[in-house]
Image (cartoon, rainbow, N blue to C red):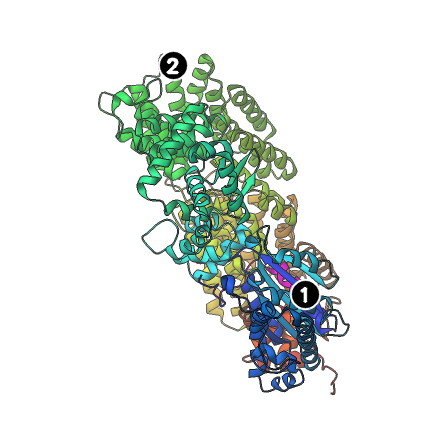
Amino acid sequence: MSQTDFTSPLVGRDRELTRLLGALEHARAGEARAVLVAGDAGVGKTRLLDEVAERATGRGVRVLTGHCVDLGDVGLPYLPFTEILGRVAADEHLAPRLADHPAVERLRGGGTDARGPGTPGDEPRRDAVRGGDAARDADARLRLFEGMAALLAGLAEDAPLLLVLEDLHWADQSSRDLLRFLLTRGTLGAPGHRLAVLASYRSDDLHRRHPLRPLLAELVRLPAVERLELRPMPDAEMARLLRELRGGPLPETTVRGIVDRAEGNAFYAQELLAATDMAASGVPSALADVLLIRVEQLPETAQHVLRTAAVAGRRVEHDLLREAVGLPEDALESALREAVGRQLLVPGEGDTYAFRHALTREAVYADLLPGERARLHGTFARLLAGRGGAGESAAERAHHSRESHDLPAALAASLQAADHARRVGAPAEELRHLEAALDLWSAVEPAARPTGEGTDRISLTLRASAAAAHAGEVHRAVALTRAALAGIGQDADSELAARVRYTLAGNLLTVDNLTAAFAYSSEALALIPAEPPSRTWVWAAATHVMAARQVGETGTALRVARRALRAAEQLGVADAQADLLISLVGLEGGARRTAEGRERLVEARELARRAGNAPVEMRALFHLAVGCFEAGAFEESLPWAAEGLERARDAGLLSSPYPLEMRYLQQLVLYTLGRWEECLRAADGAGAVPAVGGFTAAPVLYVALARGDAWAAERARALLDGPFEWMATLVAGIALTDAAAMRGDAEAAVEQARATTAALTDEAGTVPDAAVRLAALALSAVADRAAALRHAGDAAGAERWARAAGQLVETARRAAGHSEAGPPQGPEGQAWLARAEAEWIRAVSGPDAAAWEKAVAAFGYGDVYEQTRCRLRWAEALLTEDRRAEAAEQAGVVRETAVRLGAAPLRERVEELIRRGRLGDAPRAEGAGAASPLTAREQEVLRLLARGRSNRQIGEELFITGKTASVHVSNILAKLGAASRTEAVAIAYRDGLLTAEPSTSG
């Protein structure tokens, strides 16, 4: 088995690391401790222990490590302790200690006892033939144990000692006995020993009769011994580990695939990652070999049962397995007991068995011969068919029939499984079964295909496209609808041809291909007459209305919408009526922000609900939530979003477009209101999102940016990977523009704002509403640059940036509705415009208190963070106008809010303003003589810099990586304007950021 890469990053083990380092600190203080570290093979025990050992060494702790090795029935006694003694003997400073303990020398093949020379390896043989010497052997064994305890105690007197024992599940009986003695009567049994013992073992290897189990049960009852379970890594941490291991871009689909298969096991994840560039699929051969070793240790009957269970899937019912293997009950139970005892299978609810790890099942399955595999699949298909039923049984039948090459049965079962998935609200599963059916369609003779309404290829393809859209696979939905269109012949029914085209138009709208959507919706409307009205024409018209609006054909959209609404009412097509009502509210500029407009949206919601059309109901609820948001009624927005998400959950539509946007909106409202912890909890509890739903992470990104987290910009850039997505582009643009402005990069901020605005501007030239926010964010950096150039006496440079500011503010005015482009935006858009105007004035002529006061008031509708950022600018402007008391008042409010939000960069800026402007007592970092421009962590790093610590030493002392320490050092140099570490320390002493530490002696 290949070992974990010890240079790999330690990810997701902060809690466990803290516990182990805590035990180490107790030991350094003279309170001996032991921790038994349990976990499955490959879960990361060795990597964690290596991290502890490295940090222990950095703290002056001596580390000795011993390994147990799997040597079968001929294990070497005391092997891990022999290794430890070898390390002691090889160290010239420690070797003299061995001479004081001759009994211990016997472990290394030397030394004497009362019977003369010998080795522990001789003892079992001599005991067998010289039973009369048992008492003398016991006495020698006791002297050995006591000598080992005394040696360790002596070593711990010289320096704190960490003893690491790895893989106790392979320990021989003698080693287990010696460990028991050390922890009960020896080193941990006496006070004052500066010793910590960390011992690891594989919990998945401990079958019922494993000899380590009684020892563990005994040891954990000791007060100085604790057990630490190293559980599988959470998905988010596993994803982070994979990205850090790769050290470069890694497609999100690859990450998700590995995370799903590895199930929290770091070793499995590394092996799967290493195989991602290989052409072969399945389990990598090296990993398969590791997994199959334990299977091959089972008796042949148990292996046969495992192979059969692997064909059944991850989980199998006892009765079904019994029928498939064809064994007598007692033989089957014996085989299952072996597999369960070796923790390859685990019993579950309802008389089922499951593989403990999915990759084990994959490896066993891949090891089957092709004929054996097909035969077993055929067996399961016949057994399931005999049981009847639908749902999951149909899905299983489809799988087994296909793998056993019974394609007609597989096609029929796939369609049954798709029907069941639709009934239970599982669109992703419905899509999977429908695509399987479409793959099989041409391979099955027409006479053998299922018959009935909706079972032709075009109808099934349309149904698959709808399932894809509901599952959030919008690009797949487009591809499927295009396939349906390509399959329509010249003599196709006009209503079917129209239905395919307006379905394609609707799907194209979701991926922002607006011109094509309008073209196809126009074709659909032209294929069927408006009179007499029909359901197909009404739906074609409803889709055409949305497409026309998106390409700026507002007049056409209004005319068709009103006519179609009358037709829908006449025909009693309630869900189409609801859809058209929603469109009309959107076409009447700003109507959804009004009480009257929201009343009509409530009516649409009720119509869609009565008709049982969940997607249209989701659309109505989304517009209700976003209308309240645009009106500044944030608290009113939250219940609508919550209702929409609840209804989407019930209908299995959480991954479809409108619920995704409601998820985003819900978190955005919480972010805007300053309820950031609630926002983060809502994001954590939201579950997985489809690839197109990455934009829902926006509020979390905004929180991270405001709190100074470096990963936020990287995550924002990742949203731009893959096909163009309007919302993802918007979110990434806002985050990256703000990040550039916060770091003072005016060029990057302007470029990002302009590029994002251009990407989001529609084909009719309509600038997106968000352009006002993008312009205001970029203006912040532009104004900073212009002010700095004016201060430096570069009038030409300042004028150049002032012109750039003028262009940006014009974009903001146009987007906010202060032009002929369209109706004015609501409170949010007007607030961003007020900020843009204030930043423009600052860029052109300097800070203006009245403009910033207006911006603060404009954000009073509820945006806590943006109001606070404007308040800081207001305080700066007041200070410039020498209105010091007012400036101090505003700065105090900013500091209080920044602390409450955890917005560290904003807090640092306001504290710097307070210090420079002498507006009051800014909080002082511990040990510093003046208000510090540094964060609390940077102040700690600075203190260690002053002591001459290297980046690695700083990292060890502060429990951070050396790389993170290096980043903090670079930040300190930049903030203090220093060219070197020495200069930074000198500046810190000069400015009172550091005070001389009292000298110590001894």
| Numbered disc 1: secondary structure | helix
Callout 1–callout 2 Cβ contact below 8 Å: no
Q: In which quarter of the image is the N terminus?
A: bottom left
Q: Quadrant of the C terminus?
A: bottom right
Query: Horizontally, is 94 left or right of 792 in the view?
Result: right
Residue with the mark numbered 1: 180
Number of numbered discs on residues: 2
Residue 253 x, y percent position in the rendering? 42, 48
> Comparing marks 1 and 2, which lies closer to the viewer?
1
Residue 306 x, y percent position in the rendering? 45, 43
Is 17 colored magenta in this rendering?
yes
Residue at 61% x, 58% y is: 212
| Badge 1 amino acid | Arg
Residue 890 x, y percent position in the rendering? 71, 57
Residue with the mark numbered 2: 533
Residue 741 higher or lower than 104, as above or below = above
| Badge 2 amino acid | Pro
- Considering every residue shown, the one lying at the far right of the view is 191
State the extent of the magenta-drawn residues as a range. Answer: 8-22
- Main SS of the magenta part reads helix
Is 116 colored magenta in this rendering?
no
Residue neighbourhood size for the residue with mark 2, other residues' Cα within 10 Å, grouped as few (<14), some (14–19), many (≥20): some
